[in-house]
Image (cartoon, grey):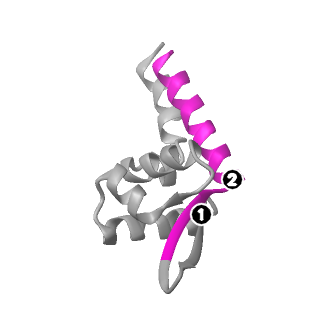
Amino acid sequence: MRPEDALPPILDLDRLVHEPARLTILTVLAAAEEVEFLYLQRVTGLNKGNLSSHAQKLEAGGYLETVKAFRGRIPATSFRITAAGRSALQAYRERMRAFFGA
């Protein structure tokens, strides 16, 4: 393969998914039906502000859904991956496999 032939697959990556924190968030969400904010924060190692920011970007892209609820009087935020998010994550994985030849 010529070096110039390797560039298009990488350039075609979904930039919303490719960012490491968002890739981690989507990967965790893909393994569960719904994930609470605090659990996701603990697993990803992101602080509250960063997690919120990345979640908002993924939600704006249609890749995750934010679920607001109450446990008694205490607010609880959870996230779910959408069908579009699951498809984007799968497409990302396939592109990476094709690029690295795995």
**Rendered location of residue 55, percent (x, y):** 47, 65
The residue indicated by pointer 2 is 84
Label 1 residue SS: loop
Q: What's the distance in space between the residues labelled 1 and 2, CA to CA?
A: 9 Å
Q: Say whether residue 92 is left or right of residue 50.
A: right
Q: Residue at the spot x=53%, y=32% of the render? A: 9
**Of all residues shown, which one is farthest toward the bottom?**
73
Main SS class of the magenta portion in the image: helix
**Rendered location of residue 80, percent (x, y):** 60, 58
Q: Residue at the spot x=41%, y=57% of the render? A: 39
Q: Is residue 70 above or below residue 42?
A: below
Q: Residue at the spot x=53%, y=66% of the render? A: 78
Q: Nearer the viewer, residue 87 or 4?
A: 87
Q: Is residue 5 above or below residue 74?
A: above
Going from the N terminus, do you reach mark 1 or mark 2 first?
Answer: 1
Q: What stretch is highlighted in magenta?
A: 76-102
Q: Do the residues labelled 1 and 2 touch (CB within 8 Å)?
A: yes
Name the kind of residue labelled 1 in the image: Gly
Label 2 residue SS: helix
**Rendered location of residue 52, percent (x, y):** 41, 70
Mark 1, Cα crowd under 10 Å, few <14 / some 14-19 / many 20+, is few
The residue indicated by pointer 1 is 61
Q: Which of 46 and 60 is in front in this view?
A: 46
Q: Which of 11 and 94 is in front in this view?
A: 94
